[in-house]
Amino acid sequence: VEKPKMPYNLIGEKKLSMLVDAFYNRVSKHELLAPIFPEDLTETARKQKQFLTQYLGGPPLYTEEHGHPMLRARHLPFPITEERAKAWLGCMHDAMDEVELEGPVREDFFHRLVLTAHHMVNTETPER
Ligand code: HEM
């Protein structure tokens, strides 16, 4: 059944795909983020497109291929500090600007990502 009010339908597959590509382009150049990601982000971006599709109320593409997301558990192998969460969100914010995702749909989406990103933090930021 079509659910036209779902954010996924408001954003659309094409813009979501452009967003994820713009996001990982920034991640790959970020000094705090690049070191914990694989060099080739093709597969990471493919999974993120699947995940965000279902996160935004679209078809459950991620779960169909990979099972329950268990996002926090899947992130445990990577040291995610508060500053890396902020960096991740900064890349996403700039990617949203780049693809001109605007208005309430952007605000709601970004707010959910802030909560999810902070939930991923699993490592204390080292003192410097
Ligand atoms: C995978 C880092 C937040 C969704 C990954 C990977 C890293 C990572 C290093 C592994 C990439 C790979 O091996 O291909 C981070 C950092 C975050 C963060 C530093 C900062 C808080 C998030 C958030 C979401 C998310 C907020 C969702 C809204 C995913 C998904 C995957 C993933 C779906 C793929 C999982 C899989 O392998 O099936 N992330 N992440 N991440 N991340 Fe994050």
Image: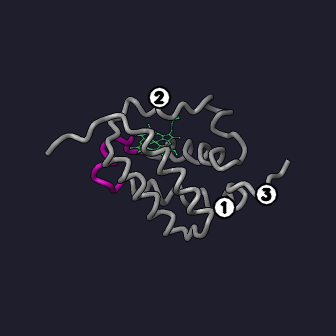
Inspect the image, locate mark 2, and give the three-letter code of the amino acid beneath it: Ala
Determine the secondary structure under disc 2. helix
State the residue at coordinates (31%, 49%): 83
**Residue that numbered label 2 is attached to:** 73
Q: Mark on residue 4?
A: 3
For this rendering, which residue is in front, 101 or 27? Answer: 101
- Residue 53 location in percent, x, y? 65, 48
- Residue 50 location in percent, x, y? 62, 44
For this rendering, which residue is in front, 75 or 47? Answer: 75
Q: Mark on residue 31?
A: none
Residue 104, located in which quarter of the rendered image? Answer: bottom right
- Residue 100 location in percent, x, y? 55, 71
State the residue at coordinates (32%, 41%): 81
State the residue at coordinates (46%, 57%): 92
Inspect the image, locate mark 3, and give the three-letter code of the amino acid beneath it: Pro
- Residue 69 location in percent, x, y? 57, 33
Asked if residue 29 lies in the magenta stretch, the reply is yes
Asked if residue 68 lies in the magenta stretch, the reply is no
**Residue that numbered label 1 is attached to:** 11
Please indicate whether residue 4 sits to the left or right of residue 81 in the image.
right
Q: Is residue 106 above or below residue 77?
A: below
For this rendering, which residue is in front, 6 or 60? Answer: 6
